[in-house]
Amino acid sequence: MTVNPPGVHRGLAGVVVDTTAVSTVIQETNSLTYRGYPVQELAAHRSFEEVAYLLRYGELPDAGQLREFETRERALRPLGRTTAELLTRLPSTCHPMDVLRTAVSLFGAEDPTEDDGSPAANRAKSLTLLAKLPVVVAADHRRRRGLDPILPDPALGLAENFFHMCFGAVPEPEVVRCFEISLILYAEHSFNASTFTARVVTSTLSDLYSAVTAAIGALKGPLHGGANEAVMHMLREIGDPGRAAEWLDGALAARRKIMGFGHRVYKHGDSRVPLMQEATDRLVARTGDPEAVRLAALHTALRHAVLDRKGIHPNLDYPAGLAYHLMGFDTPAFTPIFVMSRVTGWTAHITEQLDHNALIRPLGAYNGPDQRPVPMAV
Ligand code: ACO
């Protein structure tokens, strides 16, 4: 257990830094709302595009508004020439999150719209990101297999189009729906590390692309978004459901963090997990694949063992990691998929930060040497 010196709040734990109208975790009911709407209800009844609109404008769209939003998103999907060309020149060893971070820098370089930092300009840029990020993630997914990219299909919704661009086919509606549920659950989570990063950059009056580039860097780490990939690596390392408890004892004895478990805000279970776990269970049930069934059994065994040994609950990354694997995505694509979704929350927070901006500049409690004279040069 870390002990903070007096007046110091390491990791800003428990510190309230600003107000926000984008989302909140309601501690008493362990629930999460986006703009006042429970995320479970949004995930059950709405599309990802509707939720993206809600986060952006504060209200759900009517039919006409949704049509217009979708039309604009579909038209913005094709990558600019410079971006498309430069991305193919990145080394094949480049981490997919680094590809994405580079792509967002290039979007900024290619964006012809005026950068006056106004809400209208930033909303235009955020739509560009929503439309183009899946194209980059899908192209990179194919590149890892030595395959050429597939152009986006403007007849398809965002989730369906993503499958089309990755695999050249759209799976059954139930699979697409599970994917869409994951995107809705991942979209926004108040002042998490990557969103806070975006707000810090924005608070200096830097531009939206710089803020999102920095946020991608923050999300990449395994204590944050990188955990959904780390879950799959961990399941592979354990290998067999019968080994889960023994593996866990060894990992805890080595003081390893168990990926996909624990949360800074939720201490009695992540409110997003039950819905994502149900969706993942449906994916397991529809595949007769013995390997998927074995992996799901291992996933369950580890969840029970962690709860039993440490009393720690899974976070969203735990079921989402397995779900993406069952949908056919390779492990390095998991955190980039998280980006495709969370960009909606980041950009809503960037607009909000600018609405009542104050430079984010905390203090540090100095514990270095006392003041001393510089020795004479020798
Ligand atoms: N595995 C093992 N022990 C854990 C875990 C875990 N996953 N999570 C918390 N603990 C233990 C800590 O070791 C600590 O025990 P101690 O008091 O005996 O030292 C105690 O629980 C408190 O943990 P902290 O790390 O101080 O809690 P914090 O709120 O800072 O951590 C965090 C939150 C970073 C997410 C942590 O739970 C963790 O590292 N989890 C694994 C990574 C992960 O899944 N990240 C995804 C977060 S959710 C998201 O980004 C969608």
Image (cartoon, rainbow, N blue to C red):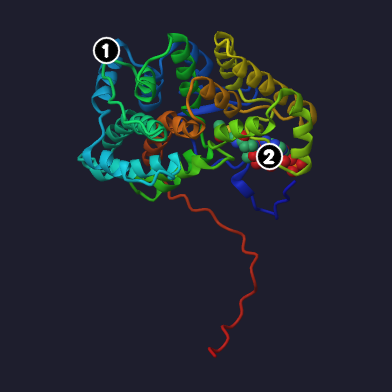
Q: Residue at the location (39% across, 42% down)?
A: 99
Indicate yes or no: mark 2 CB to ligand 1 under 8 Å. Answer: yes
Quadrant of the drawing holding the C terminus: bottom right
Task: Establish if 62 lies above or below 56.
Answer: above
Mark 2 is on which residue type?
Lys
Callout 1: SS: helix
Asked whether residue 298 is in view, the answer is: yes
Task: Establish if 170 lies above or below 215.
Answer: above
Badge 2: few (under 14), some or many (20 or more) residues near its Cα, within 10 Å? few
Between 308 and 264, the residue placed more toward the observer is: 308
Mark 1 is on which residue type?
Gly
- Image quarter of residue 316: top right
Callout 2: SS: loop
Indicate yes or no: mark 1 CB to ligand 1 under 8 Å. Answer: no
Give the residue at mark 2: 257
Q: Measuring from the top left, give residue 279's x and y in whole percent.
A: 55, 14
Badge 1: few (under 14), some or many (20 or more) residues near its Cα, within 10 Å? few
Ligand 1's image quarter is top right
Asked whether residue 208 is in view, the answer is: no
Give the residue at mark 1: 64
Dot 1 or dot 2: first in sequence order is 1
> Is 344 displayed left or right of 264 in the figure?
left
Instruction: Determine contact: label 1, label 2, CB under 8 Å.
Output: no
Between 114 and 157, the residue placed more toward the observer is: 157
